Image (cartoon, coloured by chain):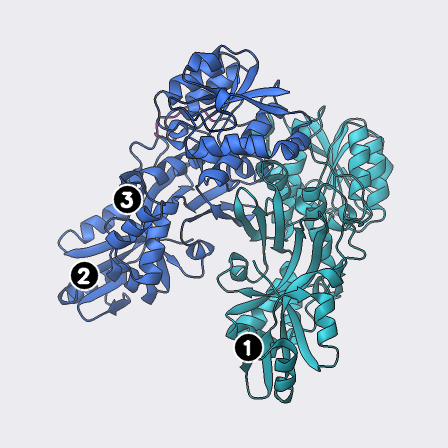
Chain colours: A cyan, B blue
């Protein structure tokens, strides 16, 4: 029997407790011994739960319990999750987490501490919720040089965009619906501004390219400026607008990494990933494109990924899994102004001539009477900004080649 | 340095040799030591290859070489792949394979021998080529009770069906095109009759439900009877026709498993998997649907999965991965006549009244003048056969709920 603990009994933590207790037999056959939930850390009380006696409000009850070998950190936020995780690793316990904020901010340091103590620090649930992605990249695609990862990494914004595309709702109405259905928080900033997605693409970039990429100065655009006009014009270019986290390694080794809304061709596999679903495309030199799709959030999907990590820790109690990256300082990140893309632009109909003068008369334009939209040739962001500095742009959206 | 060998230098084997030699640095960082290709078994000679000196025609050169710890079996076919694999495992070498025929026919026995000898027998490449699927099911989704797996498991038939659906080509013309492009063999029987797909769904069923399922008496329907009329009628039911391998565990524990063409709603993720691509949907009780998509065949994608298994063996030289199922005798397989589904049927227009008499007057029918098509209520195959025994059916195709 291996004793474990859970820190946090919110959406994910209650799911973890649920799975550990309800899937006993399945987990027993996978591990060959019982995984036993000994303690749950939460400041709240849950007197009606069948496992009410396991709750503690004191972190030290877990830290100092030598029987507990694996701890699931599902509190969210950086503090005190970071301090707790560090103490647990230093005390000889493996830690698994669903906390993308923690991994994106402190991953390299925590992986290093885990390594020095011959323990595991795993975080399958931090990207894509229940969709397997960390382990597949780390193990299954190990024989590939991964060239690019692009994903719909945030279910809330994907739900909002889907409602705009399919039902013609505007951003505010779609956000309100997402909130009413529980897909969006009352304060939706982390989702709609792309902060959640950038943490996830940074985790995938760190894992894939071996050096920590910090989200702080990565170009991050959300979806608040996307209008119904743009959604409709996208259709005329046989595309849809999706919020994409993207990282590509260039020939000189630099990472072209950002989060931004993008026009994606309808024939792309990512274009068909709708509503609250996530999808992640990994482009390997041997496999070509491989796509992973499923529910990227929610109690049970995310919890099942946390429990898969717990199982892995229990199977590797005395042996470290090879999951590691070194610290970095984003010196390997391409400045966004040097990033290259074609751009979708929309201007007043009266600015159509100006548009053609800037981008050449053979540029394909589409008009709805009031506005004209076009897709520019591929150029750096800097070139684009310079060329359009005197043009009154109603919108500009990156065009994806996915 | 760990020495390995490859048996077979065909499409997959040459890819494995290519990756091992061209991705040395990437593999070194994943394993922490060099993976060195020592010998390649093939009856042919390849004097112009840079590694021409590694070839041998004598299996014993590999079997008796104590330095070789891991062997990739990529010869295909059951004999002598089976005898060789068995001898290698008994001689203390781990074996990885892309050979679905071997795993579907002898998986339980070879896993047992590997277990007794504390070795690994891995086969990620046997299903879905370069798409990670065996490891995700075995590890990432371990906290789920998997309820159903359904997949487009054969790229050749998917390519043919896509050409029929999108370009209006008939079966023979689409098959010819697939052959010309190298997606189909000169003798396409294993693909178009569903024999390849049934091996793969049996491997997935064995892995997921823990007991070997042999393909021999599993219901297997290919796509040779699919007509352009059916493809067009499918559109009218907002569906496409796909060849699906499906396994579902029923409440009594029996496996409802088969390979058959199916009408799939266009909104399903599987409906959008086109051309030579594969897609596999795993329905877990915690994760809900997770879909894995990519190129299911081809030299480099398949070889990259073989090499990922080699890496795993090298990392676990003295320790077995937990990948196992016990032998079975298909006593847990539901007889196909008890399998339940709605059926798409097509009859001559003159038989329309008869159709309504059998299935009720409220059944939704669609007509193209000459023919009438309908989708029946859900019933067992036996009930369906009995109800329609006097009806002249032009086609009948299962309807999928995927």
Q: Chain of mark 1?
A: A
Closer-to-camera residue (B395/A37): B395
Q: Residue A380 or A260: which is nearer the viewer?
A: A380
Q: CA distance from mark 3 to mark 2?
A: 20 Å
Q: Is residue A71 left or right of residue B255?
A: right
- Secondary structure beneath disc 2? strand
Residue B46 point in image, percent of width and height: 43, 26
Circle 3/circle 2 CB separation < 8 Å = no
- Chain containing mark 3: B
On the rendered structure, is A48 left or right of B276? Answer: right
Residue with the mark numbered 3? B221
Same subunit, labels 1 and 2: the answer reads no
Q: Are marks 3 and 2 on the same chain?
A: yes
Q: Which residue is located at x 35 percent, y 48 percent?
A: B181
Residue at 27% across / 50% down in the picture? B176
Q: Is residue A382 above or below residue A78?
A: below
Quick one: A390 or A228, which is closer to the camera?
Answer: A390
Q: Does the magenta portion include A314? A: no
For mark 1, what is the residue?
Answer: A362
CA gap, disc 3 and disc 1: 52 Å
For label 3, the SS is: loop
How many callouts does the rendering have?
A: 3
Q: Which picture quadrant has residue B56?
A: top left
Q: Which residue is mark 2?
A: B347
Quadrant where the N terminus of chain B sits is: top right
Q: Is residue A240 left or right of residue A261?
A: left
**Most common secondary structure along the magenta stretch:** loop
- Span colored in magenta: B325-330
């Amino acid at each position: 029997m291996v004793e474990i603990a859970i820190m946090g009994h919110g959406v994910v933590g209650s799911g973890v407790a649920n799975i550990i207790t309800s899937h006993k037999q399945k987990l027993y056959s996978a591990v060959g011994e019982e995984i036993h939930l000994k303690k749950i850390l939460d400041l709240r009380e849950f007197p009606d739960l069948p496992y009410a006696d396991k709750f503690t409000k004191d972190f030290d009850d877990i830290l100092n319990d030598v029987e507990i070998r694996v701890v699931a950190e599902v509190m969210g936020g950086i503090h005190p999750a970071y301090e707790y995780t560090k103490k647990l690793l230093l005390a000889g316990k493996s830690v698994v987490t669903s906390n993308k904020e923690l991994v994106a901010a402190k991953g390299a340091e925590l992986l290093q501490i885990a390594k020095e103590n011959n323990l595991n620090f795993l975080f399958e649930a931090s990207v894509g919720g229940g969709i397997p992605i960390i382990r597949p990249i780390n193990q299954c695609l190990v024989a590939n040089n991964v060239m690019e990862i692009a994903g719909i990494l945030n279910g809330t914004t994907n739900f909002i965009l889907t409602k705009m595309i399919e039902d013609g709702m505007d951003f505010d109405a779609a956000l309100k619906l997402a909130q009413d259905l529980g897909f969006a928080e009352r304060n939706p900033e982390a989702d709609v501004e792309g902060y959640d997605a950038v943490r996830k693409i940074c985790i995938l970039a760190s894992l894939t390219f071996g050096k920590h990429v910090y989200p702080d100065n990565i170009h991050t655009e959300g979806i608040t400026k996307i209008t119904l006009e743009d959604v409709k014009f996208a259709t005329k270019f046989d595309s849809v607008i999706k919020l994409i986290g993207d990282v590509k390694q260039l020939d000189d080794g630099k990472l072209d990494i950002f989060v931004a809304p993008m026009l994606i061709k309808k024939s792309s596999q990512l274009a068909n990933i709708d509503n609250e679903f996530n999808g992640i495309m990994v482009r390997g030199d041997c496999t070509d494109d491989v796509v992973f799709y499923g529910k990227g959030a929610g109690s049970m999907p995310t919890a099942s990924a946390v429990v898969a990590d717990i199982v892995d820790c229990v199977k590797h109690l005395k042996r470290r899994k090879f999951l590691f990256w070194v610290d970095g300082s984003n010196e390997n990140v391409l400045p966004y102004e040097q990033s290259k893309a074609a751009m979708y632009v929309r201007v007043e109909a009266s600015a159509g001539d100006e548009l053609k003068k800037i981008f050449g008369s053979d540029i394909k334009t589409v008009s709805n009477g009031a506005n004209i939209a076009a897709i520019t040739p591929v150029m750096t962001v800097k070139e684009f900004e310079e060329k359009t500095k005197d043009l009154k742009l109603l919108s500009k959206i990156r065009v994806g080649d996915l």
